Amino acid sequence: MTATSSHKEIMPYQYLKTFFSARELLWAWTSRTIQARYKQSILGGLWAIIQPAARALLLTVIFTKFIPVDTGAVPYVIFSYVAMVPWMFFSTSITDMVECLVNNMNLVSKIYFPREVLPVAALLARLFDLVIASVLMLLLMIYYHMQIFTLQWLFIPVILVIQIALTLGLGLIGAALNVFYRDVYHLFAFVLQLLFYAVPIIYPVSKVPESIRDIYMLNPISAIIEAYRSVILHNQLPGVELFRAIPIALLLLLIGYWLFKRLEFYFADVI
Amino acid sequence: MAPSILVDQLSKRYRIGGILPDFRSILSRWRDNGLEKYHWAVKDVSFEVPPGGALGIIGPNGAGKTTILKLLSQVTYPTRGQIFMNGRFSALIELGAGFHPDLTGRENIYLNGTILGMKRSEIKARFDRIVDFAGIGQYLDTPVKRYSSGMYARLGFAIAAHVDPDILLVDEVLAVGDYAYQVKCYARMDELRENGTALILVSHNMDTIRRVCDKGLVLYRGEAIYQGTSAEAVVSYSEKIREVARQAQADVPTEGGLSQRVMTFDAEIMDVCLLDENGERTSIVKSGANAKVLVDVVFYKDIQDPIFALAFRTPDGNRVYATTTRWLKLHVPSFSSGERWRIEYSVHLPLLNGSYDLSVNIGAPDFGHYYDRLENALTFEVVDAVNAKGIVDLNSKVNFLKLGA
């Protein structure tokens, strides 16, 4: 027996239960998103590699030939690609999540299902891209005779989980608010564009002035990207800044989920 | 038995004038100067549907029919009131709402099935039945964007109808399919009901409501103005529309028959009566007798070539006979404003004992709208049929021919 009334007090564990019961839908929607993205395209999933690779290549030309940036022993192309892949996972996930409810307006206003399936599936579909793009990273590292699969790499899943928590939190906030005001999508896209330069992707953290480096690394996505670099390129453990990013990511995830569930009652009426 | 659906004092309020409050109205809410305006899409509606029951919801556009289905399917939430649903539900508010145009029929069956709450294994088990029902066999691996709208709708219904729900909510979706498919859909709905599924059907087609539903609810401006059997509800709705149209003397949306169109009062049916073979007014007719139906009409405007229609139905709404002057290929005179006319239909009534309802209407030449329409204008009894049961006297003759020893 399901009862619906104007009272909206439901216990949090029930939310998680309905979400869990929708796992098949989550899977189906994720695979639909991936399939649909590369349907009727010749290169298909290769686009997941081409995009970050082209960007890394462009940056390599600029920052080795035009304005040389010192990246130590690591070739610039790998230096930037290792950061570019998780960054693109972060930024594309967020923009996809923010617009997913509005893009599926027809579904949201016509059929009931746990609404968070849509943003979470948007993120999972981008996770698929991340995995594909990582293959090229491995190939590049082999080509440049760098050590791969070192013990430190065991940290990669940890960093990835922190990154997913952060992305989910921001994406859920954006998705829920974008239903009400489409400004949110533009705001997120714009801030992400600016943020690209405030995160150590095209330059090493060592280039950031000492005086502001602590504040700079307080940005959780900077800490996460730097942690990938330490682990993958330098065979070092992630720095302490990654652990400062954990509470921030978790807090954002909680706020995002709470806000999303709070506002979902109005989605169908407002969208 | 516990009802499958119990709805108690259900109300839903929407904000008028853009759903979004702009900055000014947000500010005004803080100051609480009452600038916000609301509209009750559904107001204090209560009903229940037992397992195996079928409730038809009828009403003009904007009466709140779809809102009720959205509330039941938890797409949107009530402002007041409560809904209890016993069991798994499947809702068809828009056919193929969850389809992705680029994915194939096969992929969409799995996707849409999961959206409707089925497990992958359940879909697999029903897959062949769904494909068979939708009749899309050879197009299974074609992207659905290349489907005709009929195929699209058929597949949508096929999936929703195979969730084997305890409760099925259907919104005016069968209009797209061809006749044969509609018959198939009704059969499937009957089958589900026999297995205990409770059905709620929203339709503009009064014949569909009469045929599929046992109970009917008439919604008007968000309120339930009538609840009863589906045949009674259709009559009540028709009366309501007529009453409103008369008051407004203007275009008023009506639906059914010449569906979703308007009734103007350019002509008005003043009287309908039945005459027996002696020319006496009557409400009792002998089986097999000839009779006349007289329809008195006043014209308020000049009207060229209108269509006069006549229909006989059984009390549970099954159509026994219907015809129009258009179908009879009759020449219809022109009518001028202020004229009064009597239209005389001569009919032969080889009907069997029972009660019959007579409906008449006058429609525009393009079937675009009614000038006037009277559902169940009168009811009469057929008597003195002694040699058969049913509706129509097929006048059997019997011979016994011995074929051998």
Image (spheres, coloured by chain):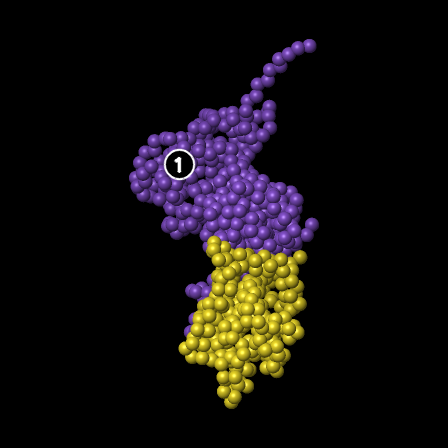
Q: Nearer the viewer, residue A64 or B182?
A: A64
Q: Residue at x 55, y 51 (%)?
A: B108
Q: Quadrant of residue A256?
A: bottom right
Residue B129's spot in the image, x, y percent? 61, 43
Q: Which chain is yellow?
A: A
Residue A175 seen = no
Q: Is residue A71 visible?
A: yes
Q: Position of residue B65 (x, y in %)?
A: 51, 53
Q: Is residue B187 or residue B397 the one in the foreground?
A: B187
Asked if residue A237 is positioned above or below residue B36 in the image, the reply reads below
Q: Chain of mark 1?
A: B
Q: Residue at x 40, y 39 (%)?
A: B362
Q: On the rendered image, what quadrant is the C terminus of chain B found in?
A: top right
Rendered position, B32 above or below B306: below
Seen from the viewer's position, the closer of residues B184 and B255 is: B184
Q: Which chain is purple?
A: B
Going 61% across and 46% down the picture, which residue do you hit? B127
Instruction: Determine crowd level at label 1: few under 14, some 14-19, many 20+ residues with C-alpha closer than 10 A.
Output: many
Q: Is residue B308 above or below residue A190?
A: above
Please, what is the three-letter code of the amino acid marked with disc 1?
Phe
Q: Which residue is mark 1?
A: B308
**Where is residue B265 drawn, in percent x and y?**
37, 45
Residue at x-position 46% and y-position 32%: B274
Q: Quadrant of residue B267?
A: top left
Q: Which structural element holds mark 1?
A: strand
Above or below: residue B323 compared with residue A148: above
Taking depth in this image into account, of B175 and A49 the one nearest to the observer is A49
